[in-house]
Image: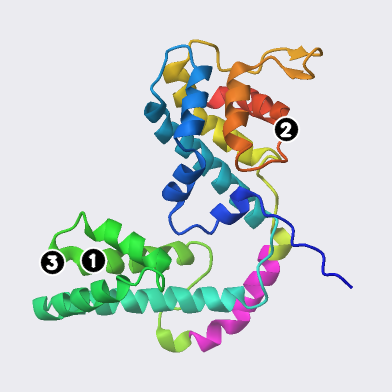
Amino acid sequence: MKTPPEKQLERWQTLVSSSDLFSDICDIYDTNFLTGFAARFDRNPAPFELLEGVASTARAYVTGKWAKLAENSKLLQHSGVHLIGAGLSARRLSEELKQVAKSKRATQAIYDRLSATLKNEAGYPYAAKAYKSATFRTGPQSRLSVIQELASALEEAIAGFIDLPADYEDEAAAKPLALGFVSVANSDAQKILPKNHPMEEAALAFHPVWAAFSTAPYRRGRYDHSIGGYNCEAGNALHQIIENLDSKVAPSLAATAIENVRTQL
């Protein structure tokens, strides 16, 4: 019996786990795309002038799709336990790095070894790019502060929705509460994002591009039976971006998204 071929993933499905989202998006919206896309605007933008806006629009759509996936999912049985563990680990890491940073020699030694380790981007595809980007903007004495503050912020973020024990010794005692947290959170979960959320996020991100390079209004317009869709230049342009990420999305959804976000502009 033949094994059925694997279903081809949409581009947005691979981009949600990208380790270099901007570069991956630029590979999709290359010079050929931007040159053709520029013809949609009556203010004659140069193709490269559109890249940042196109990338922001694509990023907004991918992020919106991920948000819908997250909203439709459930916490796992031990998610609460792991959240508490992560929050306490982040607290300890932050506290210990504060102490390490008091020694210039220790700070330099860690930075040297960490930089050498992260040169292997294949082994640490997410950490390498994030850390290089962050430390490029910091002085040598502050490089560990990047990790320390991220750890502190992570603890604060987790503590915002699940109670963390005041002492590390109380972690085991918090397990029953953590299991209860998952049960309550899953039973109380409500879907608050609109059905067309990814496209509406993209429509919000695309508006500055349209406003900068086109004199046509940013609205849906009337339904035209002769074309089987809305007479919406902005919607057609938005759809041209998004269809490169999601082949199943209908052009009418782009026009409708523009209409739905008009009050937020």
Give above or below for 172 relative to 182. below
User: Which is more foreground, mark 2 or mark 3?
Assistant: 2
Q: Give the image location of residue 56, x and y in percent.
A: 46, 38
Label placed on residue 74: none
Give the amino acid at mark 2. Ala
- Please tell me which residue is depicted at 25% across the width and 75% down the height of the picture: 116
Give above or below for 51 relative to 210. below
- Look at the image and give the residue range highlighted in magenta: 171-185
The residue under label 2 is 250
Label placed on residue 141: 3
For the residue carrying disc 3, how many other residues have a C-alpha within 10 Å: few (<14), some (14-19), or many (20+)?
Answer: some
Which residue is at the front of the view, 170 or 262? Answer: 262
> Dot 3 lies on which element?
helix
Which residue is at the front of the view, 257 or 4? Answer: 4
Quadrant in which residue 155 is drawn: bottom left
Give the amino acid at mark 1. Ser
> Dot 2 lies on which element?
loop
Label placed on residue 145: 1
Residue 64 horizontal side relative to residue 100, left or right? right
- Please tell me which residue is depicted at 47% across the width and 26% down the height of the picture: 35
Which residue is at the front of the view, 99 or 210? Answer: 210
For the residue carrying disc 2, how many other residues have a C-alpha within 10 Å: few (<14), some (14-19), or many (20+)?
Answer: few
The main secondary structure of the magenta stretch is helix
Give the amino acid at mark 3. Gln
> Quick check: marks 1 and 2 in contact, CB under 8 Å?
no
